[in-house]
Amino acid sequence: MTGESVGSYLHQCRQQQGVALAALATRLCPLNVLAAIEQGQQSPSVAQLTQLYQQLRVERNQPLPQDYPIRRLPTFNRQLQSWWQKQAYEQLVANVAAGDVLHQLTTDTDRQAVLYYYGRSLAAIGDVEAAQLHLRAGLMFMTPQYPRVYRSLDLLLLAAENSVSGLTSADPDLSGFERAVTAIRQGRVRDAPENLTLVFYQYAQTLLNLNRPQAAIQSLREAIAWDKQQQTTYLLPDCYLLLTLALKMTQSERAAFFNLADQPE
């Protein structure tokens, strides 16, 4: 992955907005700098890319697609999906904690879905230990524990649990990520493949936190390629921004970002 990919994406966004290169440059930076970024001759900084997103009205952290990550839940749990889509994590956590939601579910898939929403929401509000506990509980409903073909929700749970473990340990177990990306690469997924960009994205986030930018870049390459293959776009801006950070972290900014001595991969 090079600056050219980021530049091509920015060029496409600018064309879609109908903004002239010169007009955009006058708001941000010299025309030759912006042209070099779009042509892949220069990689933007995180600050530059963030400013370009703002000027081009590119949304990050967009609401997730409806019924994400699972196509159906019982009617009485549609509110959970709505809170999740709107990123109203505290409301979702309070509802599940106060009620008897899990006991009302009739299938293991529905139990997994609620535990996924609940675990991810707990992590979002900072209760990482409880998040890890509930995400692991969701994985217990995966049948068999090592299937030949996975549901997308199984892989999202594997990635989410490893993502949370990366917040609680200096040397986290990444086997869940490896298991998930291997299944995706080998085509062993039976449903909703457009959701799986998130697996690669979360893996890259965790790798960056572990000061492994080269491995993160590889994961982000796969995330972007998967997003384009599945014709989804909601994570593309986030992937490109994280990629810009990872590319910079392969240079002198890596040590400053982590407040660590620069170390080889």
Image (spheres, helix red, strand yellow):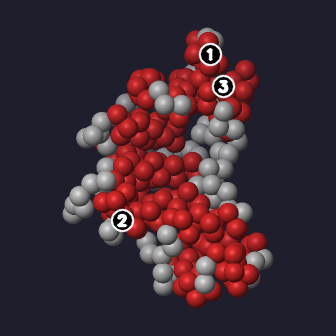
Estimate the x, y position of residue 67 in percent, counting from the top left.
67, 38
| Tags 2 and 1 touching, CB below 8 Å | no
- Quadrant of residue 160 within the rendered picture: top left
| Tags 3 and 2 touching, CB below 8 Å | no
Q: Residue at x 33, y 70 (%)?
A: 251
Amino acid on which the number 3 mark rests in the picture: Gln
- Quadrant of residue 111 within the rendered picture: top right
Q: Secondary structure at mark 1?
A: helix
Q: Residue at x 54, y 31 (%)?
A: 125
Q: Residue furthest left?
A: 264
Q: Secondary structure at mark 3?
A: helix
Amino acid on which the number 1 mark rests in the picture: Val
Estimate the x, y position of residue 219 in percent, counting from the top left.
41, 58
Q: Nearer the viewer, mark 3 or mark 2?
A: 2
Which quarter of the image is occupied by the C terminus? bottom left
Amino acid on which the number 2 mark rests in the picture: Glu
Q: Label 1: how many residues lie within 10 Å, few (<14), some (14-19) or many (20+)?
A: some
The residue under label 2 is 253
Please tell me which of labels 1 and 3 falls first in the chain: 3
- Distance, label 2 to label 1, CA atoms, is 47 Å
- Distance, label 3 to label 2, CA atoms, is 38 Å
The residue under label 1 is 101
Q: Nearer the viewer, mark 2 or mark 1?
A: 2
Q: Nearer the viewer, residue 48 or 20?
A: 48
Q: Residue furthest bottom?
A: 32
Estimate the x, y position of residue 164 in percent, counting from the top left.
41, 36
Q: Residue at x 65, y 45 (%)?
A: 64
Q: Label 2: how many residues lie within 10 Å, few (<14), some (14-19) or many (20+)?
A: some
Please tell me which of labels 2 and 1 falls first in the chain: 1
Q: Nearer the viewer, residue 14 or 219?
A: 14
Please tell me which of labels 3 and 2 falls first in the chain: 3
Q: Label 3: how many residues lie within 10 Å, few (<14), some (14-19) or many (20+)?
A: some
